[in-house]
Amino acid sequence: MAGIMTCISLHLDAEGEGKISAFLEYDPKVPFHVHVNVPNFTAFDIPRDAVAAGLNRSCPPNECSCSNICLQDAGSGWLQAILQLPRTERLHAWILRQDLEEFLVRAFSLVPDGRELLDYDWDAALRKLHDPDS
């Protein structure tokens, strides 16, 4: 089963002016995580459930428990994303809620919540442990 990748815009101010691209990738072979790549800035994995939870509740300001990204409701269909970048200050950006929702709908359609381990190919994972080049 093929994964999905989508490009979303990270707006660098609340007015939607300056923006950079972020690529979100979901691979059903690694069902618990979403890979986030912000070219020239950072790349990391975040639990899929944490992304989904960020749509429904905000991290308390200055108390975010997520190590790489924190999502906060910014109202009017926007989410504020606070990304912890390596060797620099946090990057505050705004994401259209709909873009993230559409990505998650597609990800959960590939591997529904609660089926992550049921459909996991344990034999392939074991082979990969024994032969990383396979």
Image: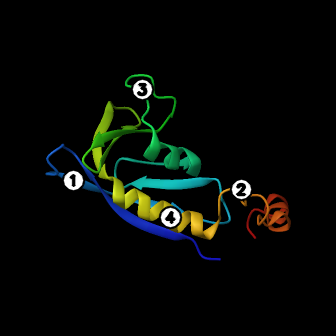
Tag 4: amino acid: Val
106, 2: nearer the viewer:
106
- Residue 60, image quadrant: top left
**Up-down relation of residue 131 to residue 56 (above or below):** below
The answer to which of marks 1 and 2 sits earlier in the sequence is 1
Is residue 92 visible from the viewing direction of this image?
A: yes
3, 104: nearer the viewer:
104
Say which residue label 1 marks.
Answer: 19
Give how far apart the Cα atoms at labels 1 and 2 are: 35 Å
Name the spot of residue 52 as percent of width and height, x first.
51, 49
Residue contact between numbered discs 1 and 4, judged by CB atoms under 8 Å: no
Q: Residue furthest bottom?
A: 1
- Quadrant, the N terminus: bottom right
Is residue 22 visible from the viewing direction of this image?
A: no
Name the spot of residue 86 as percent of width and height, x first.
41, 36
Say which residue label 4 marks.
Answer: 105
The residue at the point 43 percent across, 55 percent down is 37
The answer to which of marks 3 and 2 sits earlier in the sequence is 3
Tag 3: amino acid: Pro
Say which residue label 3 marks.
Answer: 60
**Side (left or right) of 36 relative to 32:** left
Say which residue label 2 marks.
Answer: 114
- Residue 26, image quadrant: bottom right
Give how far apart the Cα atoms at labels 1 and 4 are: 24 Å
Rate crowding at label 1 as few (under 14), some (14 to 19) or many (20 or more) other CA atoms within 10 Å: some
Tag 2: amino acid: Gly
Q: Tell us which disc is closer to us: 1 or 4.
A: 4
Q: Tell us which disc is closer to us: 1 or 2.
A: 2
The answer to which of marks 3 and 1 sits earlier in the sequence is 1
